[in-house]
Amino acid sequence: MSLIDSHCHLDDKQYRRDREAVIRRAFDAGVQGLLAVGSPPPDLEAGVRLAEEWPQIHATVGVHPHDAAKASEDTWRRLRELLAHPKVLALGEIGLDYHHDFSPRPAQREVFTRQLRLARDAGKPIVVHTREAWPATLALLKEHWIPAGLPGVMHCFSGGPVEAIQVVEMGFYVSFAGVLTYPKAVNLHQAARRVPLERLLVETDAPYLAPEPHRGHRNEPAWVVLTARRLAELRGQSLEQVAAATTENYRRLFGVPQAGG
């Protein structure tokens, strides 16, 4: 059985003292590959440095909605350069977050739209973050992304079955994180049953959102198996079936060959 953690923040300061041990524990647990998600400006390439060091790790680059106000012309120049890096698979995570509003909403929308155009020009998939902003997120995707015919993933999916079907019909993959293991996440459980097997991904979003029974602790990529197991239970499928499907979906979405994670 093989699994891939399709979204983790390996550069996070919570791993400062034991980052290598965390990565090795993931591989020891059967995780074949990790996608290190882009860091905020000005250091956009922390994930890329890890990907250069480890053959099983790939990276994304992008400006999170929390950091939209930090984007500058130098940010756009560097993103264009990094998207050409052989180990950068996608632009992300990008999107809208109306829960925290760490950046003004107009700035979030502007930066999201600009990054959609940037990814479209580079021919790269996107990794989308949306929180309490479903209507605005979907509207911008329909206007600026869907016509391009390129794929993407709704990371750490937080919607219900209605939103799940909407994004699948728009051509997106749906990635479930540790929240899926929480007993009260009923809408998420329903969504997990509705997404076609060929559109599913699993992730940790580590160091955040640790799955049960580790909830409240620092998350790490080795625990992606717990989310995959819960996903399998909800769907009435075997863990091996879900693991094989999500691994193949990851490779198909991001164009990663079998060798090298």
Image (cartoon, helix red, strand yellow):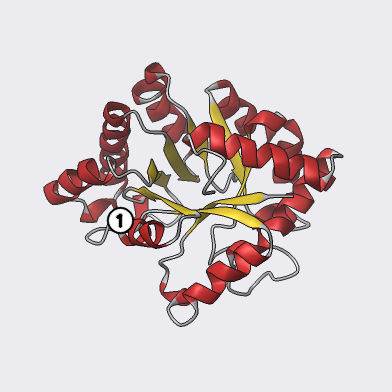
Give the farthest residue toward the left: 73
Residue 195 visible in image: no
Hey, what amino acid is under mark 1? Answer: Asp
Front residue (pair 55, 65): 55
- Relative to 143, say whether 164 is above or below: below
Q: How many marks?
A: 1
Badge 1 marks a residue whose secondary structure is: helix
Q: Residue at x 36, y 51 (%)?
A: 64
- Relative to 157, say whether 148 is above or below: above
Residue 32 visible in image: yes
Give the percent coordinates (x, y) of residue 140.
Answer: 38, 29
Q: Residue at x 71, y 40 (%)?
A: 244
Find disc 1 in the rendering and name its residue: 67
| Label 1 packing within 10 angstroms: few (<14), some (14-19), many (20+) | many
Give the farthest residue toward the right: 236
Front residue (pair 85, 164): 85
Give the percent coordinates (x, y) of residue 10.
Answer: 46, 64
Give the farthest residue toward the front: 259
Front residue (pair 63, 224): 224
192 left or right of 63 in image: right
109 left or right of 195 in image: left
65 left or right of 4 in image: left
- Relative to 133, say whether 1 is above or below: below
Say which quarter of the image contains residue 11. bottom left
Q: Residue at x 30, y 54 (%)?
A: 103
